Amino acid sequence: MGKLIGKSRRSGFILILLAIIMVFAGSELALAIPEIEFHLEMNNLNMQKGVSGNLVVSMINAQGAQVLSIIGIENFDVLSQNTSTSMRMINGISSYEEECHYTIIPKAAGQFALKAIVEYSTKTYETNILLVTVTESSLNDEKAESDLFIKTNLSKTDAYLGEKLIVTYELYTRYNIENFGFTDYTAIDGIIANDIPADQLKSEYVYLDGVRYAKYEAKQLILDPILTGSHIIPSFNLQVNVITDNSFGSVFGGFGGIFSSSQPMYLQTEERECRIPCASQDVINGNLCECCAHLPVTLNLPPHSFQICEL
């Protein structure tokens, strides 16, 4: 009888030990199963109209997942899009991450909510919501807006047919930059636009609000109106390749070392309007074109040449 009791106790102890081992093994197995995560991130939630931002959809441990849509993205222009993947090993547990990168630029000022919809294994997931605030760009020439911005300067808004105007796009930066260039063709309806040669464009250091900036004339156009009326100079996108491994320094010649890398950033110029009235002879004969009949402008013109079309 004593032997049976001893065996029974040993059996019970073994069963308890096996149960403990199974519990620990189960918990280790649970820890080894990677957790699926979906996140929406942005480098700056306070944006300025005309300046780009970087939006990232992160999909962790969800290989094969697809971004179906981003709610609210219609309030932004998507300038570029790319995907990157990475693998990490932490405490013997592997983690897979895929990121969808979007370079976006706001269409208007206001507050906008962004949320990504992701599909994985026939199921639909929603990311967190980002609330982005977009403000208007400043028109004050002496005020600093950010570390990188562009201004649109028009020599005059009212002119007569045959008079040339000049539009200058000025780039201000506190970063070292590799290069820059417009991604759009600068065509303007009703106006012939001619580029001023690049070797005639100026660059200098200026101080705005006590902060030093490198100022570049990114582009300068001579505008020759060929039609009367109101003309819109549209907004254009400028790509600036910012050197990421250097700090501030000599921006005008600093192209970095042999191992320099750069990151593209995008700016958008401001849309401007210029108005070209009818000739005086047309006014006398009553042959006003519709586009000029509503131009509320006043010009100081030589006598017997041109005058403003009045309502």
Image (cartoon, rainbow, N blue to C red):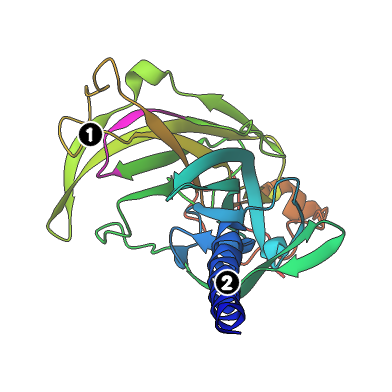
- Identify the image quadrant of residue 203: top left
Residue 246 disc label: 1
Measured as percent of width and height from the top left, residue 195 is found at 51, 24
Q: Nearer the viewer, residue 91 or 239?
A: 91
Is residue 115 rendered to the left or right of residue 139? right
Q: What is the quadrant of the N terminus in the image?
A: bottom right
Is residue 71 rendered to the left or right of residue 151? right
Is residue 179 rendered to the left or right of residue 67? left
Is residue 262 rendered to the left or right of residue 248? right
Q: Nearer the viewer, residue 244 or 79?
A: 244
- Residue 298 visible? The answer is no
Neighbours of disc 1 within 10 Å: few (<14), some (14-19), many (20+): some
Measured as percent of width and height from the top left, residue 189 is found at 72, 39
Q: Is residue 176 magenta?
A: yes
First in sequence: mark 1 vs mark 2: 2
Q: Secondary structure at mark 1?
A: loop
Q: Please name the residue shown 46% across and 49% down the image.
A: 156
- Secondary structure character of the magenta stretch overall: strand
Q: Secondary structure at mark 2?
A: helix
Q: Please name the residue shown 61% across and 66% down the image.
A: 26
Q: Is residue 184 above or below residue 101?
A: above
Query: Residues in magenta?
Result: 173-180
Q: Amino acid at mark 2?
A: Val
Q: Amino acid at mark 1?
A: Asn
Q: Is residue 100 magenta?
A: no
Measured as percent of width and height from the top left, residue 272 is found at 56, 53
- Residue 296 visible? The answer is yes
Q: Please name the residue shown 36% across and 41% down the image.
A: 171
